[in-house]
Structures are given as structure tokens and as C-alpha cells.
Amino acid sequence: MSVLEIQHLTKRFAGLVAVNDLSFAVKERSIHSLIGPNGSGKTTTINMIDGVFLPTEGKVIFNGVDITGKPTYEISRLGLGRTFQNIKLFNTLTVKENLMVGGQMFYAKSNILRFLFDIPGARREEKALSEAADQVLEFMKMQDVADKTVGGLPYGMLKMVELARTMMTKPRLILLDEPAAGLNPSERKQLIDILFHIFESGVDLFLIEHNMDVVMNISHNITVINFGSKIAEGVPKEIQNNPEVIKAYLGDRYQKQA
Ligand SMILES: Nc1ncnc2c1ncn2[C@@H]1O[C@H](COP(=O)(O)OP(=O)(O)O)[C@@H](O)[C@H]1O
Ligand SMILES: [Mg+2]
């Protein structure tokens, strides 16, 4: 069974085909990576999966449901979480508050009328959100930064906060756009540990990543794209030894390290 199926996805921007008839499937209980050169259409693919962009052609099936063209909040409620290539957090709020905001957008039981007329209900909801945030922070081993303002935190920690916020929506699958970019080696190791921890808790992962140590370490399956089209797919060993992938993307870089 697949948790996510991409069927013949195409995205055209004026005069440019960013993604071209792309199909692949993310198996249930797997970590799947999408790799390829800069500008090959990776972020555009994620944007079509989570409803930021409407595909020009093709379908996205999540958990057996056709989610093509659904708004992002609805897709998020169906259990699909996402982190961004450019971090999107509220800098003046604390880590815990950022998680609570992320959770509230997800649960969204209250509206303005409820806040005005059902104060006990709103308080109960805030308490539930606060408890959910505490649980996620504990799971992520981030209790010590809970009350720190996001604006002052190092970049590696911001990426962890974004991932933690995604966990507030109780996702079935998380899409991660370059989670290791900008991280130092020790932060990278921490990231890999936490990604495994999240995976083991029952969440499948789909990531775009340039760091080949991370990709080859954690992926069960890899899809490679170039100029918006799929050029290879397989387990890490197959991808590392695929001549077309080496030519288009890996070059000598990974070969030397391997
Ligand atoms: N909103 C947009 N409007 C026009 N062109 C875009 C837009 N987003 C991406 N592109 C173009 O689509 C191609 C693929 O971009 P992107 O998906 O960001 O690549 P990657 O994430 O693989 O580096 C690039 O040529 C990029 O310039
Ligand atoms: Mg990108």
C-alpha cells in the first residue's frame, strides 16, 4: 500500500515546464527522498502535493483520497504535514507558543464568536493545546527551549521547532523541504536521530534533501528528477550506482565519499 501516490503531475509556469509528467509512490511505513539538481522541480512537486500550487495536470492521492486541488488546511487536517525550505515561524513568540498556534490552526474549533461568548470553552481549548505542545516538546526532547523566544534561537534549532510544530497536527506523513540545509555536522546527526524517532512513532516521511549522507542514511527509497522528469528510482545502493544519476546529479561528490 502507498501512503502517497503522485500520478502524472505536471506544472507549467509561463513558458516553463517545472514538473513534467511525474509519477511515483511513497510506500506505507517508509522514508522516501526526492533528489535532483537545483531548479529540477522538487519544491514545486511538494507545493503541488500539499495544495500550495494547483497542478497543471495530474493527481495526488493521499491515504487513498484524491486531494488534488484541495486547500492546504484541509490537506493538513487529513494528516499531511510539511516543513518549508525557508523557515516560517513567528519570531516574537516562544517555541511553545509557535507550537500552540500551529496546533490551533489545525484543530480550529474556536472562532471569534466562541472566544467572545464561550470563555470557558476557549480556556479548555487553550489548556488542551498547551498540553499537546508539552507532549510534542517532550517527544522531541526540546523542553529546555519551550519558553525561549524563537527570534533568538540558532538556525538548527529553528528547523527543529518547525518540525515540532508539524507534529502538533498529528500527521500521517510529513513532507520536508531540505531539512538538513544549513545545519552543521552535529545538528545533522541530531536531525537524523529525530527523524528516525518520528518515523518509529508511526509517521512516514517524504523529503527533499541535498546532503547525500543524510539521504543515503535514512531513505528506504529514492526518486531522482532532472528538468522536472523522473530519471531514476530505487533503494540507495541502486541510486548511488546509477550512471544517469551520477551524470546528472551526484557527479564525483558522493562517489568520493562512499
Ligand atoms: N512560482 C513560480 N513561478 C515561476 N517559476 C517558478 C515558480 N516556482 C518555481 N519556478 C521555476 O520552476 C523550476 C523548478 O523550481 P523548484 O521547484 O523550486 O526547483 P528545486 O526545488 O528542485 O530547486 C525553476 O526553474 C524555477 O525557477
Ligand atoms: Mg527547492
Image (cartoon, helix red, strand yellow):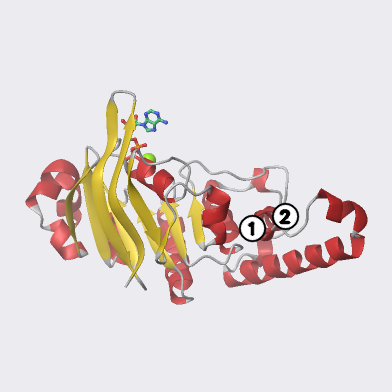
Neighbour class for label 2 at 10 Å: few (<14), some, many (≥20)? many
Furthest toward the left, the residue is 243
Q: Is residue 31 above or below residue 76?
A: below
Q: Are circles 2 and 1 on residues that touch, CB within 8 Å? A: no
Kindly identify the residue that appears in the image at 42 percent across and 70 percent down: 196
Q: Quadrant of the C terminus?
A: bottom left
Kindly identify the residue that appears in the image at 47 percent across and 72 percent down: 197
**Disc 2 residue type (three-letter):** Glu
> Do we see residue 179 in this rendering?
no
Q: Is residue 138 above or below residue 20?
A: below
Closer to the chain start, of discs 2 and 1, is 2
> Do we see residue 173 in this rendering?
yes
Kindly identify the residue that appears in the image at 80 percent across and 62 percent down: 126
Neighbour class for label 1 at 10 Å: few (<14), some, many (≥20)? some
Q: Return the x and y of residue 57 as percentages of the image width and height.
A: 31, 42
Q: Return the x and y of residue 158 as percentages of the image width and height.
A: 57, 50
Q: Return the x and y of residue 221 as percentages of the image width and height.
A: 26, 64
Q: Nearer the viewer, residue 23 or 221?
A: 23
Callout 1: SS: helix
Residue holding disc 1 = 106
Q: Image check: 90 left or right of 86?
A: right
Residue holding disc 2 = 97
Callout 2: SS: helix
Q: Is the residue indicated by label 1 positioned so its CB lies within 8 Å of ligand 2?
A: no
